Amino acid sequence: MTPPALLTVEGRSAVATRALAHPVRFLLLWYAASRLLVLLAMQVAAVWFQTPAGVGHLHPGAGDILGLWDSVWYHRIATQGYPLPLPVDPQSGRLTYSAWAFYPAFPMLVRALMSVGLPFTVAAVGLNLVLGAVAVVLVWRALGFALHASAQPARGRLALVAAALWCLYPATSVLVMPYTEPLACVLLAGALILLMRRQYLGVAGLALALGFTRAVAPALACAALAHLVVRWRDEQRAGTRPLAGQRASAAAMLLATAVSGVAWPVLVGVVSGLPWAFFDVQAAWGQQPDRGPFVLWLAWGWEERGVFGVAVIVALVLTYVALVLGRHGRWLAIELRVWALAYPLYLLAVVRPITSMWRFLILDFPVAALLASVTMRTSSGTSVVAHWRRRVAVVVVALGVGVFWFTAALLTYTPWGADPP
């Protein structure tokens, strides 16, 4: 008779084997389970942590959590459009909070769904559930690319586990809410995949769409430039003409990423008649780019904890950079590593210290690959440890706790004092 312990090991191996044999099916089932976990976390947060004053009735539920924070603004854009003229503070005479701070691609897609009779919440949440499922599959495909990456025999397993862990990123609740992150994840992962496949016109199209979805163009441009530099170098060494037959499409891709970075601010300026309207509205929301890159985070660290606070911020950044450039990042394609470096640094340079950084970083999906590598591989990074399933299980539990923490601590709304997600 087979011992129970052996049966357990064999059972786990069988599950892993089936998952690797049918990765898309596994990821979609895992994604569905993670969405149920998110909805459970929302219900727990609503019942135990959400004050009735924040939702206007005595019995908050998960549906109330879905409609909080930026969801209110996207609802307003989808149903009422953007206000003209731009709202002005009656006391200061300056532009104040308005929908113009939010990019239009997601709410316009929701409006299209609403045209067939769906209410906003059903259309927005339904759309994001579908987009999230597409995103996790694209994340898996992106992480599995081996071009310009160090050899990794267990690449398929690492990519699959990393995509599954990404579904449990603590801020994953926003992938269910009427937020723009799911659409941005799909466009971004798709653009990086097309970049690694050298389909530059496709990258250009997705980059332009990203320009009306999220402000990520500078970091995407860094990934595109790194790709072209490495390809140029490799083809020169091989004695072939660099970018043969694709120089025009590569130039179009770079132009599209540049246009993506300014498309929405320029459009806001043209429509409103105020050239700097977008940035003035952003300033009303607290953005302070005039202070200089990285200054706000370093100043915040100094104000909170002095030298120690600044040292912690610097140490965290250096540790992350070391992970990306070291053995835990080298199994990823160069395009993903450059994105993993450029995007968080771009956020630190232009975004003030706010708790919304938690959800902004959901687009940094290579961090899930770093976590999978640290969890599953040996200290040298050359092979996967035999007991990787137990280690992954521990990480999954920890991330699940993180989902409940984020949902209860940041998604609930208290009118007299709360941090926006």
Image (cartoon, helix red, strand yellow):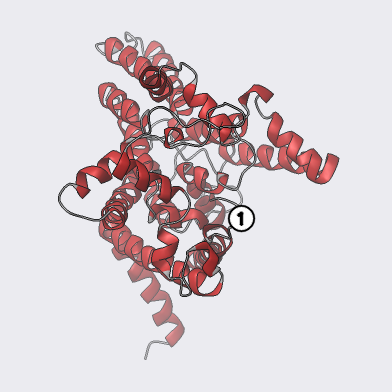
Q: How many marks?
A: 1
The amino acid type found where label 1 is placed reads Ala
Q: State left or right for residue 198 relative to residue 407.
A: left
For the view shown, which residue lies furthest in the left direction?
116
Residue at far bottom of view: 1
Is 82 on the left-hand or right-hand side of 390? left
Quarter of the figure with residue 326: top right
Q: Residue at x 54, y 65 (%)?
A: 53
Eyeballing the image, is 284 above or below 116?
above
Secondary element under disc 1, as helix, strand or loop, is loop
Q: Quadrant of residue 167?
A: bottom left
Can residue 84 be seen here? yes
* 408 versus 296 height, above or below: below
Q: Is residue 352 left or right of residue 370?
A: right
Residue at image point 43% right, 15% down: 233
Q: Position of residue 331 (x, y in %)?
A: 47, 40
Q: Residue furthest front?
A: 90
Residue ID for mark 1: 418
**Could you tell me residue 273's position as x and y percent?**
41, 17
Given residues 283 and 167, the one toward you in this image is: 283
Q: Looking at the image, which is closer to me, 95 or 256?
A: 95
Q: Nearer the viewer, residue 258 or 320?
A: 258
Q: Position of residue 379 (x, y in %)?
A: 61, 51
Res. 154 in view: no
